[in-house]
Image (spheres, rainbow, N blue to C red):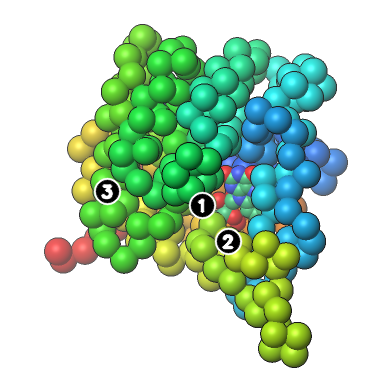
Amino acid sequence: MESRGSPLTTDLAGLLLRNPVMLAAGTAGTLDEMGSVLDLSRVGAVVTKSITSQPREGNATWRILESKAGMLNAIGLANVGLSDFEAHVSPRVAGMPTTVVGSVAGFSVEDYVRVAGAMGDIEGIAAVELNVSCPNVRHGTEFGADPRLLRDLVGAVRAALPRTRLIVKLSPVAIGTPHGIADLARSAIEAGGVPSGPNLRPGADALTIANTVPAMAIDPTTRRPRLANVTGGLSGPAVHPIAVKLVYDAYRLVCRDTGTPIIGCGGVQTWEDAAELILAGASAVQLGTALFADPRAPLQVIRGLERWVQRQRVGSIMQLVGGVVTDA
Ligand SMILES: Cc1cc2nc3c(=O)[nH]c(=O)nc-3n(C[C@H](O)[C@H](O)[C@H](O)COP(=O)(O)O)c2cc1C
């Protein structure tokens, strides 16, 4: 448990992180692989690779491409699967020098419930993050694209996960209409399961905003899509201002009033990027693509945030959450 007294300590629905800088799902190995290049005891938290009920090879290559100001990926949720995770990865969770969030993905409500329930039972998993940017096999629609599908999914998972904090990672599909992200945020927060702990809510305890932005690249010579999967998701600096706007809308329209912490995610490379998300309404941030260019980027971000908090003359970074000054 972290001390509330440290200026960078942040509070995610009662889960205290030593600082607000987290490693994003799928960009830092399955659990602890980044430990060989980055002192994990310095970061706020690590999110595991998204785990599905069965192992997945993922899509054919090419499945990661560099693009202008970002990265395009269509990994297709390649992961070891729940049984392997339980047998070979979970014994290392409790010994991790930082908070661990278990990421869960699925293609049916039953899949999510099964994997989330198992994840919640692993010693040392402090919270479960639901990656809802996956198509529902029955409808073909992404769970995170439809407020009703999302409500049903989160309600079912909440009921199966009564004692573990639940973070829902929203998709950025709602770009363009402020109410789009607000509707999704509300669905995830209200959901409808039964809370059974002092800090637990009927749905999501916290939201991560957001995942990659749907995107595509074409080779003009071969006239073929550059990704074997044809389309993929854009991440990195190109998506950062989108993430700032989504966090801003979700915070002022829903999360400020419901007291739901937001974890901002999208294109964070520097402390200034992290500070923007915090001022828009995020209580923590995740770095993903930045780790591919510089695995130690989180340390620079943490140092920069420390100095920012001092210069802003506040005792805690939490006082800067949602602190953007607007005339509106
Ligand atoms: C190679 C790669 C793999 C990813 N895998 C996952 C994943 O397994 N689960 C998930 O929720 N997000 C996954 N993401 C999305 C990231 O966690 C993050 O939401 C997104 O990349 C935006 O943040 P960034 O711009 O800092 O990378 C992946 C992203 C990349 C680039």
What percent of the width, then of the height, locates residue 17?
A: 53, 31
Of 106 and 238, nearer the camera is: 106
The residue singled out by tag 3 in the image is 182
Q: Which residue is mark 1?
A: 211
Q: Nearer the viewer, mark 2 or mark 3?
A: 2
Q: Secondary structure at mark 1?
A: loop
Instruction: Answer yes or no: disc 1 within 8 Å of ligand 1.
Output: yes
| Whether label 2 touches label 3, CB < 8 Å | no
Spatial CA distance of label 1 from label 2 is 8 Å
Q: Residues within 10 Å of mark 1 (few under 14, many from 20)?
A: many
Q: Residue at x 65, y 13 (%)?
A: 123
Which of the two discs, 1 and 2, sits closer to the camera?
Answer: 2
Q: Position of residue 2 (x, y in %)?
A: 54, 23
Residue 233: which disc? 2
- Tell me residue 119's x, y (percent): 61, 21
Quadrant for the N terminus, please: top right
Amino acid carrying label 2: it is Gly
Query: Would residue 168 be visible to someone looking at this image?
Result: yes
| Mark 1: amino acid | Asn
Q: CA distance from mark 2 to mark 3?
A: 22 Å
Ligand 1 closer than 8 Å to label 2 CB: yes
Residue 92 tag number: none
